Image: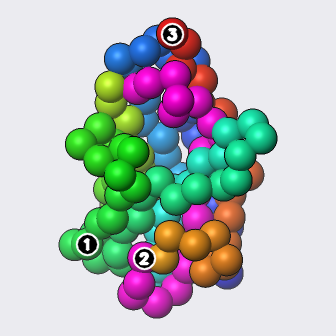
């Protein structure tokens, strides 16, 4: 498995931007599909975005399409989530996840490695 450490969360006003980073340890980072999930208080953890090992394929939840962009730098073993036009409903704990293989699943149970998460708070 791969160890994941998120950073970049914080407090931002509505309409603002944040960029989350997730640094991965271990070998063959490019062999892993990477994803971002989030969990708001009292809600289940939900898929936000995913990216294939090469970076050539991405997937987004409908709620963030056009506002969030996932990317990766395999030379730096890092995946990013650029979040623009943030809304109060984006407030949540954001988690980085990894899985081997080529499919970007939206179900939590399909992902094998998780980071500790980082808090994102969007004020109205």
Residue 72 badge? none
Q: Are marks 1 and 2 in contact (CB under 8 Å)?
A: yes
Q: Which residue lies at the image location 39% right of the left edge and 87% below the top edge?
A: 102
Residue 95 higher or lower than 91, as above or below: below
**Whether residue 91 is situated above or below residue 31 in the rendered picture:** above
The residue at which mark 3 appears reads as 124
Q: What span is colored magenta in the figure?
A: 86-104
Callout in the foreground (3, 2): 3
Helix, strand or loop under label 3: loop
Task: Specify whether residue 30 is painted magenta.
Answer: no
x%, y% of residue 29? 47, 76
Which residue extends farthest right? 42
Can residue 116 be seen here? The reply is: yes
Which comes before the other along the chain, label 3 or label 2? 2
Left of 9 or right of it: where is 115? right
Residue shown at the point (48%, 76%) measured from the top left: 105
Q: Rounded to the nearest whole Å, what is the CA distance between mark 1 and mark 3?
A: 33 Å
How far apart are the two marked residues, 3 and 2, measured between alpha carbons? 32 Å
Which of the two marks, 1 or 3, is nearer to us in this view?
3
Within the magenta stretch, is there residue 103? Answer: yes
Task: Name the residue nearer the viewer: 12 or 5.
Answer: 12
**Mark 1 Cα-neighbour bin, 10 Å: few <14, some 14–19, many ≥20:** some
> Looking at the image, is mark 1 or mark 3 earlier in the sequence?
1
Q: Residue at x 77, y 41 (%)?
A: 42
- Which residue, given by chain and number where applicable, does mark 2 sit on? 104
Which of the labelled discs sits on residue 57, or is there none?
A: 1
């Amino acid at each position: 498995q791969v160890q994941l450490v998120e950073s970049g969360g914080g407090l931002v006003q509505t309409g603002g931007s944040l960029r989350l980073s997730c640094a991965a340890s271990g070998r063959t980072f490019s062999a892993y599909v990477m994803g971002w999930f989030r969990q708001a208080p009292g809600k289940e953890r939900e898929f936000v975005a995913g990216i294939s090992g090469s970076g050539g394929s991405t997937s987004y939840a409908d709620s963030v399409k056009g506002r969030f962009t996932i990317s990766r730098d395999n030379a730096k073993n890092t995946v990013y989530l650029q979040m623009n036009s943030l809304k109060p409903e984006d407030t949540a704990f954001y988690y980085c996840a990894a899985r081997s293989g080529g499919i970007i699943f939206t179900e939590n149970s399909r992902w094998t490695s998780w980071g500790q998460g980082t808090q994102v708070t969007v004020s109205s």
